[in-house]
Image (spheres, rainbow, N blue to C red):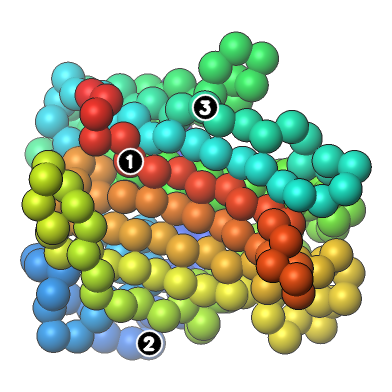
Amino acid sequence: MRVVATTAFVLVLAALSAAAEDAPKPAAVTQANAAAPPSASDLLFDQPQMKNAAPGSTITYDYLRRSGIAGGPFGAPLQDTLVLKVEPGKSSDARDISVTMFSGLNRVPAGPFEDMAGNPVVSLFLENHLKGLAKVLEANPRYLKLAIRKGLREKAVVTPTKVNFGGKDIDAWQVVTKPFAGDALAQRMRGMDDMTYTFVTAPSVPGEIVSIEASSKNQDGGELLEEKLNYDQKAG
């Protein structure tokens, strides 16, 4: 069965692409220290991120979710892995990707993805995150999706950074957005209207996605939610 993208990815990408129709398309990212930063949509959704992932290779991400909210509405802390098995696609930049998202009783159905140029880990993380967040907040998941895609389109800050890869500091980009800040329904978010989404990408890293994080703290610095995904350099 051909799977192009999951629901959250489709919604986010469609909105970002629609917003860019009247604007010049940003130049392809050839190096992460280019003079003008690319847009969040270009980095996260438009780049052929899988082009440097060798067919036959495996990309592993370490996953963590934990929350300090009394009563544990997000469930027990979870540490697991998300594994992408990469095979050749129909074009040189695309790949067929099978996914193992978590293990044992935590397993989440995902993929497979056929002839995929982008890294599906972005959509997989967001979809899983939004499912849990909507349940805890008793919110409409579509409303949360719309807020996040608007945040990526209108509120995202893109800055150059460095990450350590293979023992060297390499060029990377950081994308940060707080989509619920100032939201009309912020009072219904149980203090999580400060939720911050941080993405780090690097063209030299297989699949380009280095890390994804969604985090929120209360006014005293207590952890309401920390959910993150990190590229595992030691796996492969």
Q: Report which residue position mark 3 lands on.
A: 80
The part of the image, by quadrant, that contains residue 151 is: bottom right
Residue 99 left/right relative to 154: left
Amino acid residing under circle 2: Asp
Disc 2 element: loop
Q: Mark 3 to mark 2: distance in Å? A: 42 Å
- Circles 3, 2 touching at the beta carbon (< 8 Å): no
- Residue type for callout 1: Tyr
Q: Quadrant of the N terminus?
A: top left
Give 225 or 85, whichever is nearer the viewer. Answer: 225
Residue 18, percent across and down?
A: 46, 74
| Residue 93 percent coordinates (x, y) | 15, 43
Give the SS element for disc 1: strand
In terms of sequence position, does the residue under pointer 3 or pointer 1 come before the other?
A: 3
**Callout 1: few (<14), some (14-19), or many (20+) C-alpha neighbours within 10 Å?**
many
* Of the image marks 2 and 1, the number of the one nearer the N terminus: 2
Up/down of 233 relative to 158, above or below: above
Residue placed under numbered mark 2 in the picture: 22
Res. 231 mark = 1
Above or below residue 5? Residue 45 is: below
Residue 39 sits in which quadrant? bottom left
